[in-house]
Image (cartoon, helix red, strand yellow):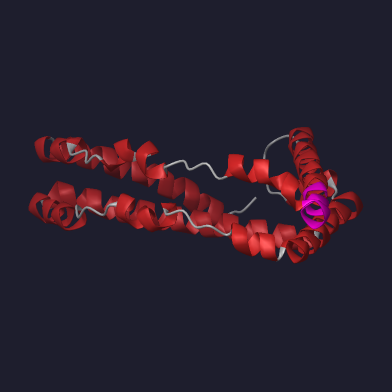
Amino acid sequence: MTYAIKIFTTIVFQSAVVFLFAGSVIAIAYGAMLFFRKEWALKVNERLNRWTSTRQMMRRMEAPRNVEPQLQRWHQFAGVFLLIASAYVFYAVIVSYSPKAIAAAYYSKAPTWVVEIVLAALWWVIALGSVGGCILALILIFRPPVLRRLEAWANRSFSVRHATKFLEVMNHAPDQLIVLYPKVSSAVIVLGSLYVALMLGGVLLYPF
């Protein structure tokens, strides 16, 4: 299990580094284009400034869907499935969860004791969550009416679209700064991206 976690974290970390390194190289090329061929860079900005509204995409996700009739009809089956899954998670956490082993598998410059404290807290969250899942499963199997109050409380609707409405407002200030100060903007973009590219390139060539 520890070896699998180590491989997974290594793949995720290296993929993130490669993605960010490629982005920094593209940013350097854009900064150079802005310095030598301002009109080309502005055309690229015009092409990329197409507006895509996430509110339209999230509208279907926010539509309420009633699954209570299916849950009430198959409550024993759902309860048994939840009980088995929660019991398995609790067993795995008790038997094979080792904060020290997992901390040793992570490539982190943080002190080992800090990582162990975080993983120990995560252990308690998973353990208590699995115990709560077992209790909920037993109620679902033997006393489903008890869950009606909980279902009424959990069925409240919260709109993500309203909460993130301010993020949908277009901000043209960066484009205006680039148009007004192309040389300065180019220098800032190139220097910042070059620093990021050198740091990430070192990580790729000499992984720790």
Q: What span is colored magenta in the figure?
A: 135-143
The residue lying toward the viewer, choosing from 45 and 50, is: 50
Task: Count numbered badges in the picture.
Answer: 0
Which residue lies most toward the front here?
145
Q: Residue placed at 79% from the left, 33% from the top?
A: 113
Query: From what the image shows, is residue 182 above or below residue 48?
Result: above
Where residue 85 sits in the image (x, y, percent)?
79, 60
Residue 208 relative to residue 167: left or right:
right
Residue 205 shows up from this direction: no
Residue 110 relative to residue 153: left or right:
right
Where residue 198 sits in the image (x, y, percent)?
44, 48
| 164 part of magenta stretch | no
Q: Residue placed at 83% from the left, 54% from the top?
A: 142
The secondary structure making up most of the magenta span is helix
The residue lying toward the viewer, choosing from 114 and 32, is: 114
| 137 part of magenta stretch | yes
Residue 151 relative to residue 122: left or right:
left
Query: From what the image shows, is residue 163 above or below residue 14?
Result: above
The residue lying toward the viewer, choosing from 148 and 22, is: 148
Where residue 2 sits in the image (x, y, percent)?
80, 57
Where residue 8 sits in the image (x, y, percent)?
67, 61
Residue 193 shows up from this direction: yes
| Residue 123 found in image quarter | top right
Quarter placement of the N terminus: bottom right
Residue 195 relative to residue 151: left or right:
left
